[in-house]
């Protein structure tokens, strides 16, 4: 839209002309009168003109004015009428009139006579500063806008513009018709036009017309300056003035937050589709196409425009943030659909293997070429060469390097994306945060980055030139002192850092917008600054765990064995120094609750750096960890996943009850899995035969092939989508990756052999119960499961009771055992009375198998 600031008549054009033009003409005229070579004789040739101040009417009755003129040694006279001064046009004097009011007839007459007129505040200001009276070609009432250069835009009414320009001149301001770099303030009546866009790009303050009016009201305050930041900010143009915003694709909470911010920043919000709307703000990650055809006057912009406008404290240019429709909507990666029309089980297994192989190839993203030690290479019997299996030590060392590389990238993102822009001078709209706040938030992050960059480079050299004798522990020991120096200052004040972020985000909308903009960038993986800053807190414990794994796979004769132990101890020293005042009672209580509830829970689960994130109740859909259909509980920690199944009731307990009152453990430990072993998280699509199912593609460091663990959620909370995102976020934190969402893949149930159709049927539950009962009975009465030492003690005890020899006792024991087993086979289980025929068949089968075994 064309700028309307110049829509004035010829009569008012002189008011908009640059005030500097007249000053330059006066200067040029004076220069023309000075001939070359005569500069030294200017004072002799030009007569001295004495300045005389005339205090007119009310000004002549103010004692402070007369005293001020005496201080600056300027002669003055007092008069009630200008006519009394018959010689005020005399060339011997430069007459300056001091008038208390700039709106009466006296003032107008002096202006028509081209007299030099000033106001009382100018005299008082000069006396206070010890300066001479300023020269001004226009009437100057005060110095509130002295040295300020103003430009106007968006004014359609000539009378309003003329009034504003006049008042600005009376306060010492200079007016420019065209906007340029010398302009210090843009007085805007609209957020449209080229001048507004240029002012935003240059970071110039943009104020409302009320700024001039309010400054004129304070014209008699000697120390007042219109450029005062606190005063000026009261009249700044809010970013969304004249804007009607609608929001599409955002969650309810985020939408409510953005609507509140819109009102705070001078705009209004409307429902999507309202014709009065001027801007449609779109969440580009969720919206791939608009639900309607937008009008030409409607700006359809990305959310970065919204937050960017708040950050720079001015409405950003829409052209840089326009939302473009996607002809081919970007979808998440999904596992390829495999047709399973043929019921051949071998074919199904082969296709499942191919699917897992594809996931393996997508997972392997090594930043360096694989280096195979010659000692690990084995000749293949087949004509087609097979991939050589790397040593377990190499596998874990590779994981250490990859996580270290990812960690360095995260720290670089924190500094380059957050700290450097906040510390940059000359920010649009002024500094977003104070230097003290920036220092509190980021602390020693740059020092930590320097240390880990060196560790990463050393690890990279080690992996490229890999041999089994390479010293991994030596690299950590080399920088142990630097780690001890850099980590405690950050970790010990991490809580203060988070509190500062939270407080500034609430109190400073520009900082809130700054965080929102960066969080949406791919480098952050949609993580907040606080979530990224927790990485240094988690890194050293992760390195210690990896070094432990490397030590396990290091031969005793390897010289790195001792070095690794020393490196682990050095990390423990750092962590002990850090965590000595960081342990929290609540976190420890949660750990002990898990330990008491899970029978056989590993002792190394207890750790000061570990925290419980979420508990989930599921049913196993595969036979890899336990029987299909068993109830499985998943305990998600920040760096590992504890998998436990429901504990089976023991038939005929042979153990004495516990003496303590704590209830027995209800779960049985299955596996404690580090989150780094989870390579993919499969979100299995909902179908008629599959509900609330998901799967994990895992691979231990010593395995070349992936394993698929599938589960069905049995609770409504948390929702499956939230659980998968939470799991991927913790996995990404463990492996130091920002893009957690890339770990989630969508899969069809048939492609990964997952089905939940029979999980809830009565027949299926009964079948699983019979299967479990059969296993328990077989274990209870099978000699193959009985330790020889316990059996020998039982026989000796039996012979001692009957007074027989061991051999005869053995024969009697076997005979009694046969009798009891046969009688047991014919007894119906109370839990299975609803299925007599099935149980009878199962009991006969069990009887035959047990008798044959004995």
Image (cartoon, rainbow, N blue to C red):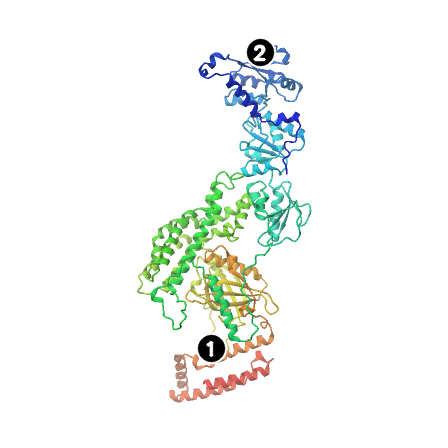
Is residue 642 visible to us here?
no
Element type where label 2 sits in the image: loop
Q: Relative to residue 443, is residue 469 depicted above or below?
A: below
Q: Position of residue 466 (x, y in %)?
A: 35, 60
Q: Nearest the camera: 435 or 167?
A: 167
Label 1 crowd (10 A; few <14 / some 14-19 / many >=20): few
Residue denoted by label 1? 654
Residue at far top of view: 86
Q: Position of residue 464 (x, y in %)?
A: 37, 58
Tell me where residue 185 sits by quadrant.
top right
Q: Nearest the camera: 558 or 127?
A: 558
Q: Residue at x 48, y 77 (%)?
A: 653
Q: Nearest the camera: 823 or 569?
A: 569
Tell me where residue 700 sits by quadrant.
bottom left
Label 2 crowd (10 A; few <14 / some 14-19 / many >=20): few
Q: Relative to residue 107, is residue 190 depicted above or below?
A: below
Mark 1 in CB contact with mark 2 (< 8 angstroms): no
Is residue 126 visible to us here?
yes
Tell me where residue 121 sits by quadrant.
top right
Residue denoted by label 2? 90
Q: Position of residue 306 (x, y in %)?
A: 59, 46
């Amino acid at each position: 839209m064309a700028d309307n600031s110049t829509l004035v008549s010829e009569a008012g054009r002189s008011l908009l002309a640059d005030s500097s033009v007249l000053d330059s003409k006066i200067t040029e005229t004076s220069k023309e009168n000075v001939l070359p070579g005569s500069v030294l004789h200017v004072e002799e040739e030009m007569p001295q003109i004495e300045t005389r101040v005339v205090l007119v009417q009310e000004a002549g009755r103010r004692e402070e004015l007369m005293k001020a003129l005496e201080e600056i040694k300027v002669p003055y006279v007092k008069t009630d009428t200008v006519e009394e001064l018959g010689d005020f046009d005399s060339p011997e004097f430069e007459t300056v009139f001091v008038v208390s009011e700039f709106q009466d007839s006296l003032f107008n007459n002096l202006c028509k006579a081209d007299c030099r007129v000033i106001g009382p505040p100018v005299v008082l200001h000069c006396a206070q500063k010890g300066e001479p009276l300023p020269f001004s070609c226009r009437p100057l009432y005060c110095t509130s806008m002295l040295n300020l250069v103003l430009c106007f835009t968006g004014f359609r009414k000539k009378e309003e513009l003329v009034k504003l320009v006049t008042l600005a001149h009376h306060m010492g301001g200079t007016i420019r018709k065209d906007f340029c770099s010398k302009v210090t303030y843009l007085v805007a009546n609209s957020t449209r036009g080229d001048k507004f866009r240029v002012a935003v790009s240059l970071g110039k303050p943009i104020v409302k017309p009320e700024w001039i009016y309010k400054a004129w009201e304070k014209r008699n305050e000697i120390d007042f300056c219109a450029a005062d930041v606190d005063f000026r900010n009261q009249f700044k143009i809010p970013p969304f003035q004249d804007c009607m915003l609608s929001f599409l694709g955002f969650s309810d909470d985020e939408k409510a937050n953005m609507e509140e911010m819109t009102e705070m920043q001078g705009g209004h919000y409307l429902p999507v589709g309202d014709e009065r709307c001027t801007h449609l703000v779109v969440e580009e990650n969720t919206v791939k196409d608009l639900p309607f055809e937008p009008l030409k006057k409607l700006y359809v912009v990305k959310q970065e425009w919204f937050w960017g406008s708040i950050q720079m404290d001015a409405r950003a240019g829409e052209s840089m943030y326009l939302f473009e429709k996607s002809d081919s909507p970007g979808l998440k990666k999904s596992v390829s659909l495999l047709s399973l029309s043929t019921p051949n089980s071998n074919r199904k297994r082969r296709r499942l293997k191919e699917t897992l192989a594809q996931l393996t190839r997508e997972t392997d993203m090594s930043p360096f070429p694989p280096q195979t030690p010659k000692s690990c290479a084995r000749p293949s019997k087949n004509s087609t060469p097979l991939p050589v299996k790397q040593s377990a030590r190499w596998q874990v060392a590779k994981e250490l390097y990859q996580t270290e590389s990812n960690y360095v990238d995260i720290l670089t993102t924190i500094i380059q994306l957050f700290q450097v822009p906040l510390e940059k001078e000359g920010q649009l709209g002024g500094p977003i945060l104070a230097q003290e706040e920036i220092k509190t938030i980021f602390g020693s992050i740059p020092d930590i980055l320097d240390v880990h960059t060196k560790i990463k480079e050393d690890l990279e050299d080690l992996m490229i030139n890999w041999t089994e004798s390479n010293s991994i522990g030596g690299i950590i020991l080399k920088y142990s002192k630097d780690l001890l120096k850099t980590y405690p200052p950050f970790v010990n004040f991490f809580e203060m850092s988070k509190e500062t972020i939270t407080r500034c985000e609430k109190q400073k909308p520009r900082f809130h917008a700054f965080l929102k903009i960066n969080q949406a960038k791919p480098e952050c993986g949609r993580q907040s600054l606080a979530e990224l800053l927790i990485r240094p807190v988690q890194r050293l414990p992760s390195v210690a765990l990896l070094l432990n794994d490397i030590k396990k796979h290091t031969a005793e004769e390897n010289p790195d064995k001792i070095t690794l132990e020393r490196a682990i101890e050095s990390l423990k020293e750092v962590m002990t120094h850090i965590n000595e005042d960081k342990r929290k009672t609540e976190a420890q209580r949660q750990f002990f609750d898990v330990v008491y509830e899970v029978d056989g829970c590993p002792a190394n689960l207890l750790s000061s750096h570990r925290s419980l994130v979420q508990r989930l109740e599921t049913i196993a859909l595969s036979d890899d960890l336990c029987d299909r259909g068993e109830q499985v509980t998943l305990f998600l920690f920040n760096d590992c996943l504890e998998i436990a199944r429901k504990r089976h009731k023991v038939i005929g307990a042979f153990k004495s009850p516990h003496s303590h009152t704590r209830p027995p453990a209800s779960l049985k430990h299955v596996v404690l899995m580090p989150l780094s072993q989870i390579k993919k998280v499969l979100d299995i699509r909902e179908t008629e035969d599959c509900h609330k199912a998901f799967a994990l593609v895992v691979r231990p460091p010593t395995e070349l092939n992936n394993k698929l663990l599938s589960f069905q959620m049995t609770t409504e909370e948390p929702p499956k989508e939230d659980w998968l995102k939470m799991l991927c976020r913790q996995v990404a934190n463990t492996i130091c990756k920002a893009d957690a969402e890339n770990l989630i893949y969508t899969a069809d149930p048939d492609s990964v052999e997952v089905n939940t159709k029979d999980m809830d049927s009565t027949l299926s539950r009964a079948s699983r119960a019979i299967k479990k009962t059969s296993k328990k009975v077989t274990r209870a009465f099978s000699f193959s499961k009985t330790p020889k030492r316990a059996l020998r003690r039982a026989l000796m005890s039996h012979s001692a009771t009957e007074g027989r020899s061991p051999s005869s006792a053995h024969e009697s024991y076997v005979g009694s055992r046969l009798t009891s087993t046969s009688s047991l086979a014919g007894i119906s289980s109370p839990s299975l009375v609803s299925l007599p025929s099935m149980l009878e068949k199962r009991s006969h089968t069990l009887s035959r198998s047990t008798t044959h075994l004995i």
